[in-house]
Image (spheres, rainbow, N blue to C red):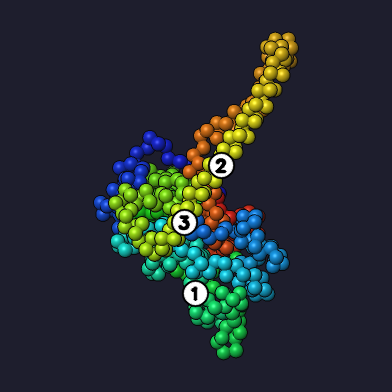
Amino acid sequence: MGQDHSVIDEDTPPKTLSSRSLASVAEYILSGRAKRIVVMTGAGISTAAGIPDFRSPDTGLYANLASLDLPEPEAVFDLGFFKVNPRPFYVLAKELYPGNYHPTVSHVFVRLLAEKGLLHQLFTQNIDCLEREAGIPAEKIIEAHGSFASQRCIECKTEFDAGKMREFVSQGEVPRCEDGGCKGLVKPDIVFFGEQLPKAFFDRRDMAEEADLVLVMGTSLQVHPFAGLVDLAAERVPRVLFNLERVGSMGCQADDVLALGDCDEGVRRLADELGWREELEEKWRGLVGEGEAERQLQGAKKRVEALHDEVAKLAEEVDEVLHLGEKKEKEKEGSHVEALNPENKPDGEGKVVNEVDPVAEDAAAIKSSVKNTDITKTVEVSVETTNALKPVDMPDGEGRIVSEQKAGGQQPGDTKSSA
């Protein structure tokens, strides 16, 4: 975490793929050489589903918890606070509970890999259960940070009935253990601050070492120990990143392919190269329905349009700065002519001091930055590759997750997956 990674030189040839491209990845899969594909997913895979993020000032989930008198928003995922006051968590749970959202085309692509016998293991940071909703076999899913898929008493650890749990959550009520006279609080099997990751994560993490292809989708690769999985694969194993920006060590090995941009769009491009696009779209639309499919597609379109507007606004601001710089240039034209005389602006030894207008220089730098910005890589994802569904951040060295805020850094739900 926090380590700098050097991007591989463009002139360095790949060792396994014919080229660092999705077409070459498709060729590798279709050749039969990829039989144990490991997939890693984060919140960016669920962006199109419409799951709200944690930190948007007006619409984020933490903002909606402001009226519940929390000592801090992150307390909603603190086990100690939950034992004292579980109600805020169940307000949040009602919003996030499975059934409120639908899988994206990226989720269904992973299901397609499983159906074709190519999925070795899926590791996800998400707690939204959309992988299960998509039809990916449960035995192929490792929910590194837990999920809403199961729940149990925090005292006696007795499992709680899923149907009853849904009733309690839908009514905003707090469930309690019904085993004997326990009456302990019931909590979904989501990893809270200070809790250990699921045993299954550690039992199966070696499957990442067995991979012959690694697909990384919508994650910042900043949350450990999950983020370390990507580096367990052998060096010659191709790794593909579907994300808004380069993250972690991705792009540092000869067979790394970076499909930067919208996660769903990148997955569709790979499906095109594989000849699976029609099958993928048919399965996705059949699962979520035409209405939901169109909503997700329109949502993606709106995100791009919003980005165009943002870039246009930035361009206007740059023009204003440039005009200001031109005005100052004219005002200082006389003094610049005088400055060419070594006798006017000496540095103490008769040398001329080079004068540069800082306004014009800064404006030129901003304009260059805008000109070279790929707007498809600068969309801010609202949810992995975003701020959503990450109640856990950093390990304390014993398989537990602790808040980076408490450690003096990142907070729950924080990611850096926007360019």
Q: Is residue 4 visible?
A: no
* Number of the label disc, if any, that sits on residue 304: none
Amino acid type, mark 1: Ser
Q: Residues within 10 Å of mark 1 (few under 14, many from 20)?
A: some
Q: So how many labels did they put on this image?
A: 3
Residue 254 in view, yes or no: yes
Dot 2 falls on a residue whose secondary structure is helix
> Which mark is first along the chain, 3 or 1?
1
Residue 296: give its label.
3
Compared with 348, 25 (above or below) is below
User: Would you say 200 lies left or right of 308 here?
Assistant: left
User: Judging from the image, what secondary structure is the residue with disc 1 in?
Assistant: strand
Q: What whole-number distance in Å separates the C-alpha atoms at marks 1 and 2?
A: 43 Å
Q: Position of residue 60 (x, y in %)?
A: 61, 58
* Residue in the picture at 38% in, 60% down: 284
Q: Which mark is residue 150?
A: 1
Above or below, 149 against 403 in this view is below
Of residues 21 and 375, the one drawn nearer to the viewer in this rendering: 375
Please name whichever residue, 327 or 152, is drawn nearer the observer in this view of the structure: 327
Q: Element at badge 3?
A: helix
Q: Where residue 116 sits in the image (x, y, percent)?
A: 29, 61
Whole-number angstrom distance, CA of label 3 to CA of label 2: 20 Å
Q: Residues within 10 Å of mark 3 (few under 14, many from 20)?
A: many
Amino acid carrying label 3: it is: Gln
Q: Amino acid at mark 2?
A: Asp
